[in-house]
Image (cartoon, helix red, strand yellow):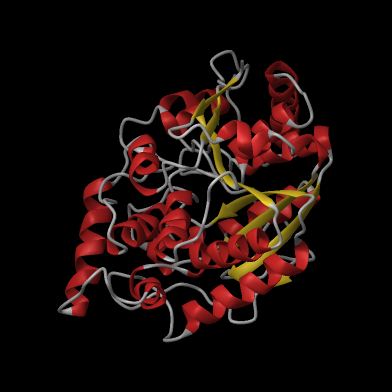
Amino acid sequence: MSYEIIDLMNRWKIFAEDLDSRHVLFMFFIASTETSTIPGISVAGPDPFSTLYTPTLDVEYLVLGKPRTIDMVPITPEGIPTPALITKAVFNLIKPSYLIVDSGVFREPKIPFISIPHKTVGGRIDEEDSLPKDFAHKIFEESRILGRMLSDKKMFIIIGESMPGGTTTAMSIIESLGFKGLGRTSSSSPNNPVKLKIDVFKKALARQGSFSSDYDVFRIIEIFGDPLHISIAGFVIGALERESKIMLAGGTQMYAVLSILKRLKTDLNGKIIVGTTRWIVEDITSDIKGLAREISPEVPLLYTKIDFKDSPYEGLKYYEKGYVKEGVGAGGSILTAQIIYGLSIDEIKKEIFREYERLIGSGYVKENR
């Protein structure tokens, strides 16, 4: 089997029993946080300021095959392209329904998208609150309404995200909600800046003077979080109210969403799974298995076993060195293609290689072969 399941409470069979009869819908939530501009926090862009544009460019590329806002596919400082490349390749094969949700992006994408009314860019949490007072609850409720609007009991919804700096705010959310988050979230770099992330959180704590994890959930998000994770949490609750089933398609960031859901006493049994990549699960600088055990043991964790060791392109081989790992629903899109559409991992890899070749031919990626 080319994917594996970590199921601590034997919920996978319950979740999967009627997946084949459900309509598949992908949702991509995008947002920006000024936290991503802290030097060294994120490599999801060629420089810290450029990370604010990454979500916009990711979804423009996913939809159009090329970006519009800036003529540049998001790359790391080393020139490794966005994980949206993987999702785009999978979409070339399965051609699913999908929507983009703007929860607070720095620049609106030049494509059709759904806008959350109280969307806003998140603040730099070491210096200021992430969101204005009462915005977290408003973003949550508006996203909850959206979840109800788009969902029904015949749907399987896969939720991906793009927000540089998100593993730092996710760590802060998890820790401030009373779980053990420090040093457990991943990074798009092999050199996970764990100490820097913890320093950012400590500065956010110091701004408060006094703090308790018993604070109101929404106030905690306004202090330590971002607009993205609370928006996804709201959407998930709305979709669950309509009896949809959900895959949170991402890495350790999705455990920030689950920590919010657990604090809000949401019943997750047999209703949600997390889908990611082996690069996240095998990452020794983070701890997705530990987060799963502590926060949501009733939620199965699935991961695709795809690897790029045999890639003809050096840029993709960097995934095997700990770069990028996940994002824009990469792992979840592969898993959906495998589980729902019956595609083999070899078919998926061949299309990823073709899409990478197309980016080279378009001049978006420079490749030394």
Q: Nearer the viewer, residue 14 or 88?
A: 14
Q: Residue 146: percent from the left, percent from the top?
A: 70, 70
Can the viewer see residue 144 in this picture?
yes
Among all residues in the image, which is located at the extreme top? 310
Q: Nearer the viewer, residue 355 or 147?
A: 147
Count of numbered badges drawn on the protein: 0
Residue at (75% x, 66% y) in the render: 113
Q: Using the rendered view, name the quadrant where residue 218 is placed.
A: bottom left
Q: Using the rendered view, name the quadrant where residue 148 is placed.
A: bottom right
Can the viewer see residue 86 in this picture?
no
Q: Nearer the viewer, residue 64 or 146?
A: 146
Q: Is residue 4 above or below residue 160?
A: above
With 203 as the anchor, is 269 left or right in this view? right
Q: Nearer the viewer, residue 216 or 101?
A: 216
With 72 as the anchor, is 136 left or right in this view? left
Q: Quadrant of the N terminus?
A: top right
Q: Using the rendered view, name the quadrant where residue 313 is placed.
A: top right
With 318 as the anchor, is 211 left or right in this view? left
Among all residues in the image, which is located at the extreme bottom? 133
Q: Residue 76: percent from the left, percent from the top?
A: 49, 43
With 146 as the anchor, is 271 left or right in this view? left
Residue at (33% x, 52% y) in the render: 40
Residue at (71% x, 29% y) in the render: 339
Q: Residue 188: percent from the left, percent from the top?
A: 44, 42
Q: Residue 356: percent from the left, percent from the top?
A: 69, 31
Q: Quadrant of the C terminus?
A: top right
